[in-house]
Image (cartoon, grey):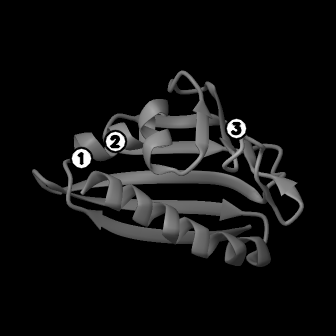
Amino acid sequence: MTINKFEIEINASIKDVWLALTNSTEVSKWMNNTKVQTNWKQGSEITYTCFDEIGNVTQWAGMNMIWKGNIKVIDEQKELTCVYPDKLTGLEEESYFLEKLSDDKTKLIQIQKLTSQEVADGYKEGTVQTLELLKNHLE
């Protein structure tokens, strides 16, 4: 197992960052062409599916970009952790930790547990871009 860790400061309240991460409609607003299906409760299934402009499931390295897992931890305005038992995309677990820096500034730490260094390296650029999309959406 290999770990990627990312940190970003967002000029938005912790409440707004949390909502953007844990509301399916909000996720679709900043995570381009992504649909999230879940009820946002601990232990529940969660599926992230990425689509292209014409509605087909996006492919990456020959795999459909669909992450099916379970919500392991959902602690309001603190932590969201999801596990992906099938490991088809190389992602085993993903966590978001929020830290209030001020009323209108939040630190977001994202940690990914991946099956190999090669897979981890493949996720880095896309994850950085995704976090920037979140930041740009909220600011």
Up the image or down, 43 lies above or below 16; here it is: above
Badge 1 vs badge 2, beta-carbon distance below 8 Å: yes
Q: CA distance from mark 1 to mark 2?
A: 6 Å
Badge 3 vs badge 2, beta-carbon distance below 8 Å: no
In the picture, the quarter occupied by the N terminus is bottom right
Q: CA distance from mark 1 to mark 3?
A: 25 Å
Query: Label 3 crowding class (10 Å Cα cut-off): few <14, some 14-19, many 20+?
Result: many
Q: Which residue is mark 1?
A: 14
The residue at the far front in this view is 54
Q: CA distance from mark 3 to mark 2?
A: 19 Å
Up the image or down, 100 lies above or below 86; here it is: below
Q: Which residue is mark 3?
A: 69
Tell me if 76 is positioned left or right of 34 in this view: left
Query: Label 2 crowding class (10 Å Cα cut-off): few <14, some 14-19, many 20+?
Result: many
Q: Quadrant of residue 9?
A: bottom left
Q: Position of residue 30 (x, y in %)?
A: 44, 49
Q: Position of residue 78 (x, y in %)?
A: 34, 44
Disc 2 residue type (three-letter): Trp
Q: Which residue is mark 2?
A: 18
The residue at the far right in this view is 62
In the foreground, 82 or 133 = 133
